[in-house]
Amino acid sequence: MIQGCPGGPDGSRRCGAKCEGITMQMQGSLAVVKVEAVNHPAHYQTAAGIEAIEVIEKYDLGFCLGSAFKYLTRAGKKSRLTELEDLKKAAWYLKRWRERPYYSEPAEDVWHWANPVKIVSAFGLSGPRASAVMYILNSVGVSSPDDQIGAAIVSVEREIRDATL
């Protein structure tokens, strides 16, 4: 039985509590608990099942405010050991947002930012990861970005698959 889980009234291992994303498998006499860490991690959800990403998208918070929101809402939930770090990250993103200009003239080095190949090179990316970033950057400003993002997903999934072989 999972420590702290009272189990069901009938003595079963299910207590009826919301434990989405958490599975338990018996391996002999040991219970192995697996926590979903990718699709719907518990540290990004409310008790009602609302996920941080849903709020970020509905409010169109963008990267800096969305990241700050994410870190503020997960602080202390992912791990007590990372709570202070999460709060510091939230503060960093909030300061970054506040310090950025709402509108500025293009910088003189705009050529660097307008060229996805140079950005990929600057980050030292190659293979499927480089392809995914190229697709993401090339999706900006096109009338139908879905094809570009779909290709980025395929590239990332290829790298995940290759990493697990």
Image (spheres, grey):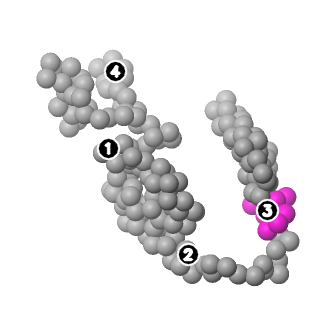
Rendering quarter of residue 88: bottom left
Amino acid on which the number 2 mark rests in the picture: Arg
Q: Is residue 90 visible?
A: yes
Mark 1: amino acid: Ala
Image disc number at residue 26 = 4
User: Which numbered mark, 4 or 1, is in the foreground of this view?
Assistant: 1
Q: Name the residue that disc number 3 marks.
A: 119
Say whether disc 2 or disc 3 marks the residue closer to the N-terminus. 2
Of mark 2 and mark 4, the one earlier in the sequence is 4
For the magenta stretch, what is the residue range?
113-125
Above or below 41: residue 85 = below
Q: Earlier in the sequence, mark 4 or mark 3?
A: 4
- The residue furthest left is 9
Residue placed under numbered mark 2 in the picture: 96
**Of 155 and 29, the residue lying toward us:** 155
Q: Residues within 10 Å of mark 3 (few under 14, many from 20)?
A: some
Q: Quadrant of the C terminus?
A: top right
Q: Quadrant of the N terminus?
A: top left
